[in-house]
Image: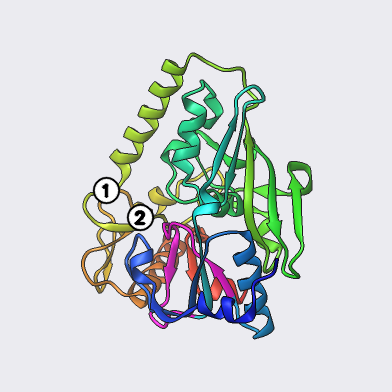
Amino acid sequence: MALLKDSVTSLIASQVPLASHTTMKVGGPARHFAVAENREELIALLGWAKERGQPVFILGAGSNVIIADEGFPGLVLLLGRAFRNVTVEEEDRRVVSGAASPMPLLGRAGVERGWGDFVFLCGIPGVIGAGVRMNAGTGGGELSHIFEWAEIITSDGKMKRLSREELTFGYRASSLKEMKGAVVMRVCLRSDEEPLPPAKTLALAREELEKRLLRQPENHRNCGSVFKNPPGLSAGKLIEEAGLKGARVGDAEVSREHANWIVNRGNATGSDIRALIERIQEEVYKASGVNLQREVVLIPEDILDG
């Protein structure tokens, strides 16, 4: 049953600060903000925004976004409890999950059963819905390798299930990004490999996490990798070779441990981070002729221009 208009309005708050919802801890307020606890609420909230011409941003774990100091001029949605349900179909080597489940949780579900192609997920922050949209991955694998289907709500409120064959995946990209207004609700992942002894996959997962911890800047807020690796090259190495390790704009700094990370050393603003991103792109191009492409998502521009 559809929610009454008054019920939808009661779910929405105004001018809600967003910085605390991101790993970088920067950004201004959402004009409107709501938590959709189930599918019915999600559909109703999307309809509310569409009626008013409000842009919508689905905020996951906030681990790959930089929100502008001015905030977001529309409706920011978090997906609640019903979107964190996980079902493991062991015989078919499948994990079916709501879009708000953390990727490491799904990785562990597979790893504990000896599914080696799930190991890479254990080291990726963020939620699976956002992960599928960007084809999240590491050197050990990417989501397109284990993706089977995704259930989405389209911009006109229709529910669709899209198979692997119906989507196009690329490096840190999928055709879901081109479906303006579409929201991922559920995802099915499937292992295509013969199971290994769980002790073996658990050991591989520990190695993956240890490698990530070695690369990760200590004790500073960050948003993970800022740039995509150009074909055959390392973005971090290009940034380091341009002499940019430790470069700063305000309290935003290129990490001294891993040059493809920007850290917040105190009170960095969204403007500081954007200015540092632009400086890195300019300096790397001068030094190597390579145009670095962002992996991190800038809000609101990547939503409004997408």
State whether residue 139 appears in this view.
no
Q: Within the image, what quadrant is residue 45 found in? A: bottom right
**Which residue sits at x=54%, y=40%?**
86
Tell me the CA gap for discs 2 and 1: 8 Å
Is residue 69 inside the magenta stretch?
yes
The stretch in magenta equals 56-72
Mark 2 nearby-residue class (10 Å; few <14, some 14–19, many ≥20): many
Tag shown at residue 261: 2
Q: Identify the mark at residue 43; answer none if there is no mark.
A: none
Instruction: Evaluate if marks 2 and 1 touch, with contact meaning CB atoms under 8 Å apart.
Output: yes
Nearer to the camera, 21 or 87 = 87
> Element at badge 2?
strand
Q: Is residue 278 magenta?
A: no
| Residue 277 in sight here | yes
Q: Quadrant of the N terminus?
A: bottom right
Q: Which mark is residue 257?
A: 1
Q: Residue at x 45, y 22 (%)?
A: 201
